[in-house]
Image (cartoon, rainbow, N blue to C red):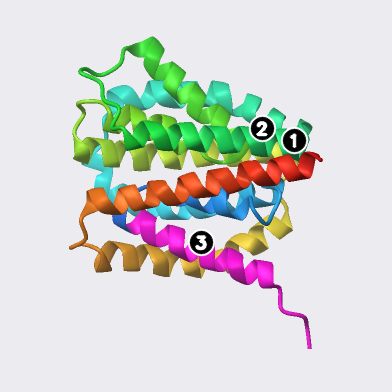
Amino acid sequence: MPAIDVYLIIACAIVFGAAIVRGFSGFGFSLLTISALSLIYPPQQILPPIFMMELAASINLLPAIWRDIHWRSLFPLIIGCMIGTPIGVYALSHLPPAPMLLALSAFVLVSVWLMWIGYSLHSMPGLPATVAAGAASGLANGAFGIGGPPVILFYFASPAGAAAGRASLSAFFLCIDIIGLSNLSAMAGLVNMGSVIRAIIYLPFLIVGIWIGHHTFKGVDEAKFRKAVLLLLGLMAVLIGLKAIITAQ
């Protein structure tokens, strides 16, 4: 009788919980999943299957959100992402795990703090700032698989509106996952059969979790729910930082 892979069971539970958050709020899947999985797996094993699942989730949502996408900001963000992603992938494949985990911890903590305080803008950023936000997202996506926070802040701090923000984020996530996956494959050689098998194992938990999040939590106070998620992310970021310190010793 084959031994039970406890880590795989924990990973499936993490994917399921993060998918519930994604189904409810429209984002947060990669941020939660990769932060939690980094406690049990190295980043190189985590990113490819998460990108594959994010692609599946985003493609599924695209027809419903197409009309609300803020195209004028989306294209510069994608250009910036294409610039930043190869740099992040290079860091992922060439730097040792401990510094990468410390950087991930710091990145998540700063992102959580900015989202917690409700950072806001009075007008849509100009072209240079928009490209820079996309580049920051690409850098983080290539290095950690968590490209969402810079662009989540970009849209939810801007006056674009909730519908345009959610739709544009879903479209952007689709694009950055394609860019990230192609760079992981071409530059780092991290996409292999093992990645595909992990994605297939995780996929049912993603689908069911998104369905539950979308249909079950409609009556929940969104502001309170997001604060609870941010507190959880902050705790995981601290744990990742502690793991990095222990790994470096």
Residue 41 belongs to magenta span: no
Kindly report which numbered mark, 3 or 2, lies closer to the viewer in this rendering: 3
Instruction: Kindly report the distance in space between the C-alpha atoms of the residues bearing marks 1 and 3.
Output: 24 Å
Q: Which of 68 and 157 lies nearest the eye of the viewer?
A: 157
Residue depicted at 70% across the width and 41% down the height: 244
CB under 8 Å between discs 1 and 3: no
User: Label 1: which residue?
Assistant: 93
- Mark 3 or mark 1, which is nearer the start of the sequence? 3
Q: Is the magenta region chiefly helix, strand or loop?
A: helix
How far is disc 1 from disc 2 in space, using C-alphas? 6 Å
Q: Which residue is mark 3?
A: 15
Amino acid type indicated by mark 2: Val
What residue range appears in magenta? Answer: 1-23
Sequence-wise, the earlier of marks 3 and 2 is 3
Query: Which quadrant of the view contains residue 97?
Result: top right
Residue for point 20% across, 38% down: 162
Which quarter of the rendering shows the C terminus?
top right
Crowd band around label 2 with a 10 angstrom C-alpha radius: few (<14), some (14–19), many (20+): many
Of 185 and 90, which appears nearest the observer?
90
